[in-house]
């Protein structure tokens, strides 16, 4: 069986909602950053709603927590997008738009090729990493695990 990498990242916005003026520059660049992801080597899929992003989804029942879920060929492809493209400029500026989440905010795990994670599965994986730390079941950039054999 072949595998691909699923990931979730969450953030707590500084704005009261995503439409708050403090979030404007971030929101105005979402389409550009999402298009960059979709055109990146190794990109497979990302969660999006009718607005072409996932900022209106609310699995934590908290309008200040936004999520992103995506699927990539491997950890390297995701890392290249996150740290070696224009995305990294926004990552460096994250304190302008986001509060300290106070916990692990990114989780990765291997899924069978051709599958996509549900929001519920992704939230559970992040909770597992927050509770138990990195393992072959769920991990992060600091403690990556290789694809299953």
Image (cartoon, grey):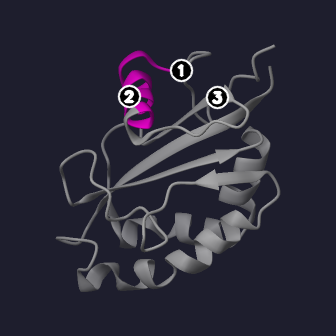
Q: Is residue 16 above or below residue 84?
A: below
Q: Is residue 4 above or below residue 134?
A: below
| SS state under label 3 | strand
Name the residue located 31 percent from the left edge and 64 percent from the top edge. Answer: 56
Q: Label 3: how many residues lie within 10 Å, few (<14), some (14-19) or many (20+)?
A: some
Name the residue located 46 percent from the left edge and 39 percent from the top edge. Answer: 118
The percent position of residue 32, horizontal first and vertical second, equals: 60, 79
CA–CA distance between discs 2 and 1? 14 Å
The percent position of residue 68, horizontal first and vertical second, equals: 47, 54
Name the residue located 58 percent from the left edge and 40 percent from the top edge. Answer: 116
Residue 134's disc number: 1
Q: 70 or 133: nearer the eye?
A: 70
The percent position of residue 121, horizontal first and vertical second, equals: 43, 31
Q: Label 1: how many residues lie within 10 Å, few (<14), some (14-19) or many (20+)?
A: many
Q: Label 2: how many residues lie within 10 Å, few (<14), some (14-19) or many (20+)?
A: few
The residue labelled by disc 2 is: 124
Residue 120 lies in what quarter of the image? Answer: top left
All told, the count of numbered labels is 3
Q: Which residues are magenta?
A: 121-134
| SS state under label 2 | helix
């Amino acid at each position: 069986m072949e595998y691909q990498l699923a990931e979730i990242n969450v953030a707590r916005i500084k704005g009261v909602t995503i439409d708050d003026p403090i979030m404007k520059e971030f929101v105005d660049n979402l389409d550009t950053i999402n298009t960059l992801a979709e055109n990146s080597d190794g990109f497979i899929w990302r969660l999006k709603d009718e607005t072409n992003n996932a900022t209106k989804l609310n699995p934590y029942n908290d309008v200040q927590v936004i999520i992103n879920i995506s699927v990539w060929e491997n950890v390297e492809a995701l890392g290249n997008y996150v740290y070696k493209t224009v995305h990294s400029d926004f990552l460096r500026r994250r304190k302008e738009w986001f509060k300290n989440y106070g916990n692990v905010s990114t989780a990765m795990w291997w899924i069978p090729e051709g599958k996509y994670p549900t929001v519920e599965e992704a939230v559970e994986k992040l909770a597992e990493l927050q509770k138990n730390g990195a393992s072959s079941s769920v991990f992060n950039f600091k403690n990556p695990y290789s694809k299953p054999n």
